Amino acid sequence: MIRHPTISVFVMIDRADTTLAPLLAFLRSMPHIRLTDQRQLPQDLSSYDVVISLNDNYLSDCIDPLTQYVHDGGGWLMLVHFSVHPLPSIFGVQQEPLGPQAELRVIFENPDQPMTRRLPDAVYLKGRFHALTKTAIDSETILYADWRYHHKAVFTSRRSGKGSAACTTLQDYAHPVLQRIIYRMLWQLADRKLSVDSLGVGILGYAPSVGPLHGIGTEKTSGLTLRAVCDSNPERLNEACLNFANVKTYDSADKIAEDPEVDLVIVATPPNSHADLCLQMMKSGKHVVCEKPLALNVRETDALMEMAAKHSVHLSCHQNRRWDPDYLAIKQSLVDGLIGDLFYLETFVGGFYHPCGYWHSEVQVSGGTSLTGVPII
């Protein structure tokens, strides 16, 4: 199975500064990112792949050693935070005068580079508009912002010696897309290959309501390849073969767990089987995406999380409704404090044939209707 190499990152920041808290929490959630944060730059940086710094007052004494660190093959990411201090020449850019608070439409300069995979064409980020001007011809624009009918660089990168230096003026560190872009930039600065081999996907449980949809989603997602379908019903396996050419079929979970071509298993069986099957797949070294609900109780959920951490595999719950416009609107209203503190929420998944199907409403199978509701936060 595909495993990411470890990337060691040193973050030069005052621990009392909470500006980067959302970004650092996101990076720490990645088991292959080893993060160290403190204010003082260590004398020996050889054990670190990338250094992240802010352009604060206490950076001035560190410019020369960090420049040498990049020349020797390291990566340096500068986060520009409204400072008037000139940026070190190694970045090949300088900051323009600080602009107003705005919602910035940010776009990749090169839409075909590996960093753009599975990310939106444009993202809207909150923060002060702060453009970068190139001072070196070999400075590469990664992201630009639309501003008064002009494209203004806001994220750049430049090779220097054996290493690379990148900087950005974007500040919306809680935004999931910016978090992923910075994460991918760390890969690039650490001289790791972003375009990993395709992940082989297996679907465990091929119900007509979800099996074909997961197969179609897999085939339409770059970096994923549908390898196998598993179900105890022979008719469903025949349907899978008709829907997807050359897919392998299995009639037991043991067989798909043993398939070396399957790196990730989508568990789409009845809810009361989710915990046992997810545990089995992760114990076999497979990444897991489980249909909702992830489990029927906290005890099962804790066991799943422990197994994922033990085997360093991905575990997530497929909850496509979290991207629905009404769901996002409700969530944003809570985040913005428009309706006060939430103390009660009632949701329903169904239609005119209320109550909805057997899986949703039968307590012994799904835990009851309360488990099928959509969590807001």
Image (cartoon, rainbow, N blue to C red):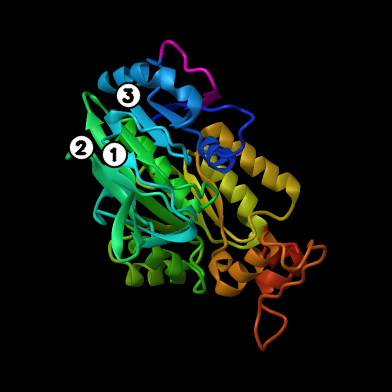
In the image, taking residue 174 as reference, residue 122 lies left or right, namely left
Q: Residue furthest top?
A: 43
Give the quadrant of residue 122.
bottom left
Q: Tag on residue 74?
A: 3
Question: What's drawn in magenta, residue-wise?
Answer: 35-44
Q: Position of residue 360 (x, y in %)?
A: 68, 70
Q: Pick the quarter of the image with the N terminus.
A: top left
Can you name the residue that lies furthest to the left here? 137
Q: CA distance from mark 1 to mark 2?
A: 7 Å
Mark 1 crowdedness (10 Å alpha carbons): few <14, some 14-19, many ≥20: many
Whether residues under marks 1 and 2 lie with C-beta atoms below 8 angstroms apart, the answer is: yes
The secondary element bearing badge 3 is classed as loop
The outermost residue toward the right is: 343
**Image vertical order of residue 277 relative to residue 206, above or below:** above
| Residue position for label 1 | 93
Secondary structure, mark 2, is loop
